[in-house]
Amino acid sequence: MEASQKVSLITFLVGSGVDRVNQKTSARVDLKFFFTVALNSLTLAALYFIVAAGFTLVFGLMRVLNLAHGAIYLLGAYVGFEVMQATEEWLVAAAGGAIAAALFGIFIHVAILSWMPGQELRQTLATVAVSLIAADLMIAVWGGLSYQIEVPDLLFGSVPIPRIGKYPIFRLTLIGLAVAIGLLLWLLLNRTRLGMMIRAGVDDREMLAAMGKNVPLVFVAVAGLGGLLAGLGGVVGGSALAIAPGEDARVLLSSLVVVIVGGMGSVVGAAMGAILVGFAEQFGLAYTPTYGVVYTFLIMVMVLSLRPRGLFGAGA
Amino acid sequence: MKDSENRYWIWSLAGVFLLVFPLYAPAFWVTQIASQSFILGTIGLSLVLLAGYGGMVSMAQLAVAGVAGYFAAYFGVHSGASLGHPLPWGLTVLVGLAAGTTFATLVGLTAVRCQGIYMIMITLAIAVGLFYLARQNLGFFNAYNGFHGVKAPVLLDTDLRQPIPFYYLCLGCAVALYALVVHLVRTPFGLALAGVRDDARRMRTLGFDVGQIRVLAFLIAGFIASVGGLLRLWYAGSISPGSINVGASITILIIVILGGMAKPIGAFAGALLFVLIQNFAIDFIDRERFNTMIGIILLSIILFLPNGAVGLVESIAKRFRAEAGPSDRRSETGAATELRR
């Protein structure tokens, strides 16, 4: 799909709502509303990208659809919250949540998935079981209450932005963080030895193993990296939004849609998918509140019926 | 020869047991356990046809049942007077079945271009999309509230929702659809479907229309799930977004894994196991931790019994037979490869 088509798709989806709002209020306020929604969309897209990038990497290399990714995200968020309570340091909390999630990701891979290599369906079903258990145990430990991780003082408050007025600094930082993570991932994949092995493994696992590389170890590294990104996303999401039971399913579904739209295994695709889904969700909610949530799934069905492997998926 | 004689006796005994069971069992066992197992088993059966024989794991089968249920509720008798167009019950049933089957065919048309894991994802997304649509739409789905006080048909002065008539209704539907699936997989269509599962490219080269076969499988499975959806509607007497959420969709998948998807009977065995666990687990553990237990059971089955409970029973039976005489290798190879794809 061309970029112009994508833009027209979004305008098509939100167009009717914009007209309706225009009749009610003055154009100036409208424009401010429009830009605020756009910035909110970018914030959401940033969070989705951080979470979905790990998901897509794991799938690209191991061909495992890790349906426990949402549970990993939520565990990262809860651990981040606990560390925050104990240390009052946001960066330490972020590191703690990310490391806990990475360990959980590695645990799932080593203890369960590596026992059934190549059996994709069985692995996928096993991750369903893991996510059921993990979600239930997290309710047992943290209960049904909703938590929020405190934002560090430095990033607390809001800054004035022309045309919008005040906007929370933390959300802007989130967009910057996503861009930084995207760049780091690009450097990792394209400029390091590990990245070279990951890319080779995505293309042809058997050949990489035949070259004498330790493929199982690369798998563990990627499982950890995927968990790390999910956990970091959990702490960030837990600071910008909230931590509660059910967030795991929401995040998993968003990541699924992001990654399906963008193309499984492609980090660029995850970025494009995150932006598309973030905008569709926020503009849908802002202009047609009743059916806002449905648009995301419409986009996905449309993309899949045109390009079954997603926008950036290999070998459509 | 001896083997088929044994099988004949087992089936006859099971048939007689199922027919007289409700006359002696308490109402709880008749409705809560047996009827509910038949209903969930029927919806599971549609997934076995798609996944076991077609190699297409669809997470949208419960959504299909939900569409059938919603249409039957909207066009049937229920307590919310402001919404709906009550029709004669024969038409209500027809509309429900037609709507569910049509929806399943549409899902099939969208999903058959994707395979394996991609198909799980797109069908899961369709199911979630329907859930949100049902929750938000007031004009047809009645949003959060859904429909309550839905009445089952009254046939020959018998309310079909009374425990014993309802049991026989569920039994009849389940047996008929089971026979349909067992017959279907032996027809040229069923063989072609298994061929598409095993090697789609080769089947295409042989001149089969792979897409058509897959969509047809979705249509037939959709009809089966729709029957299950109507029974489920009458069983609960209500339908709401909560009855078609992700958790409910995963329940159908759990049932099929518990029983094993290599054979149609697996769906019913899995449903019975699930219903038993659901009703009696609270005797052993805290009610709150039901998901942990079902998750652990599920994980153990995936790890150690890839062919589910039916596979376990078969391998035990085979061991007994091996002690008595030469083993029957044929059935083993048929079932062993199921979860691998």
Image: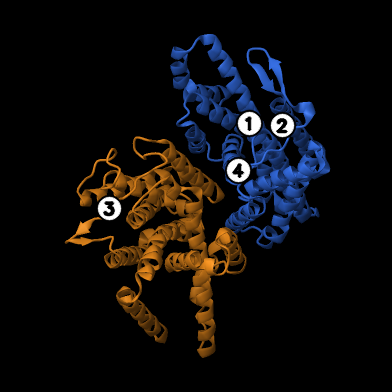
Chain colours: A blue, B orange
Q: CA distance from mark 1 to mark 4?
A: 16 Å
Q: Which residue is mark 1?
A: A45
Alpha-carbon distance for marks 2 and 3?
53 Å
* Along the viewing direction, whichever of B8 and B247 lies nearer the viewer: B247
Q: CA distance from mark 1 to mark 3?
A: 46 Å
User: Mark 2 and mark 1: span between their CA atoms?
Assistant: 9 Å
Q: Amino acid at mark 2?
A: Ala
- Of residues A276 and A90, which is closer to you in this image? A90
Mark 1: which amino acid?
Ala
Nearer to us of marks 4 and 2 is 4
Dots 2, 3 in contact, CB < 8 A: no
* Residue matched to label 4: A247
Q: Earlier in the sequence, mark 4 or mark 2?
A: 2
> Could you say where residue A276 lies in the image, as x and y percent from the top left?
58, 30
Image depth: mark 1 or mark 3 in front: 3
Which amino acid type is shown beneath numbered disc 4? Answer: Glu
For numbered disc 3, what is the local secondary structure? loop
Secondary structure beneath dot 1 equals: helix
The circle drawn on residue A178 is 2
Disc 4, SS: helix
Quadrant including the C terminus of chain B: bottom right
Question: Residue at left 71%, top 38%?
Answer: A149
User: Is any part of residue A9 visible from this angle?
Assistant: yes
The chain containing the residue under callout 1 comes to A
Q: Amino acid at mark 3?
A: Lys
Q: Are marks 4 and 2 on the same chain?
A: yes
Q: Chain of mark 3?
A: B
